[in-house]
Amino acid sequence: MKIALACATLGLLMVAGCNRSTQTASAPPCNVSSAPIDSSARAQLIVARDAVWRAYFAGDSAALVQLLPADMVGMGQDRAGIIAESQEGARSGRRLEKLEFSCDEFFVSGDVAVVFSNYRTDVQEGGKLSVTSGRAIELFEQRDGRWVNPSWHLDDVR
């Protein structure tokens, strides 16, 4: 339910905050903000995001089970599919050389956060370096005192 509310709220967001004129009388109050967010929450979200990406490229299924909730969907795949893809990449010799994020925007409402960012990955595979960059939209939810990543969308630029 929290994720559905966050996604519905996301539809009300503008870069500078909420567009309150689009709210209806029955909608919950818009209390989402991009800045300032608690520096501790921001740091935790950055660590959680980094952990998910690094675990994925490392093929670390144990970490991914902890970081991705069972009910997650990312780019049309469920957790099992993402973990299988991650392990297959690691078995093929794929190795993350560089991971960078920039232009971070954080929208937090209670224990749900949406993180917008630009990303770049440099991946070595089969003796070839592949650089991918794009825009990421990642949903995080705080469960049992830690941030987990139940959904994301990536737009690669290459």
Image (cartoon, helix red, strand yellow):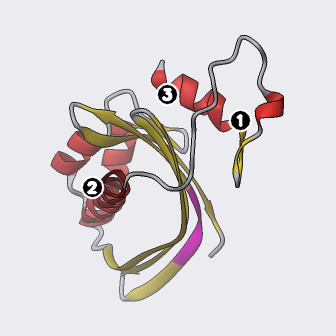
Q: Nearer the viewer, residue 99 or 27?
A: 27
Q: Is residue 134 magenta?
A: yes
Mark closer to the chain start, 3 or 1: 3
In the image, the segment drawn in magenta is 132-136
Query: Mark 3 and mark 1: span between their CA atoms?
Result: 13 Å
Give the image location of residue 80, x and y in percent. 33, 37
Q: Secondary structure at mark 3?
A: helix
Q: Main secondary structure of the magenta part?
A: strand
The residue lying furthest to the left in this view is: 62
32 relative position to 100: left or right: right
Q: Is residue 154 magenta?
A: no
Residue 125 percent across, percent down from the top left? 37, 79
Q: Is residue 122 left or right of residue 20?
A: left
Q: Tell me the kind of residue under disc 3.
A: Ile
In-image side of 29 versus 89 (left or right): right
User: Which three-letter amino acid code belongs to the residue tagged 2?
Assistant: Gln
- Give residue 3's mark: 3
Residue drawn at 62 percent across, 76 percent down: 158
- Residue under label 1, please give it: 11
Q: Residue at x 64, y 37 (%)?
A: 10
Residue 44's place in the image compared with 65, above or below, is below
Residue 44 location, quadrant: bottom left
Q: What amino acid type should be assigned to the residue bearing mark 1?
A: Gly
Looking at the rendered structure, the secondary structure element under dot 2 is helix
Residue mark closest to the camera, 2 vs 3: 3
**Quarter of the image holding residue 70?**
top left
Instruction: Tell me the distance, in whole angstroms, between the alpha carbons under discs 2 and 3.
Output: 27 Å
Q: Would you say the residues marked 1 and 2 are in contact, meaning their CB atoms lie under 8 Å apart?
A: no
Specify the label residue 87 is tagged with: 2
- Residue depicted at 45% across the width and 52% down the height: 37
- How far apart in space, not on screen, are marks 1 and 2 (Cα)? 34 Å
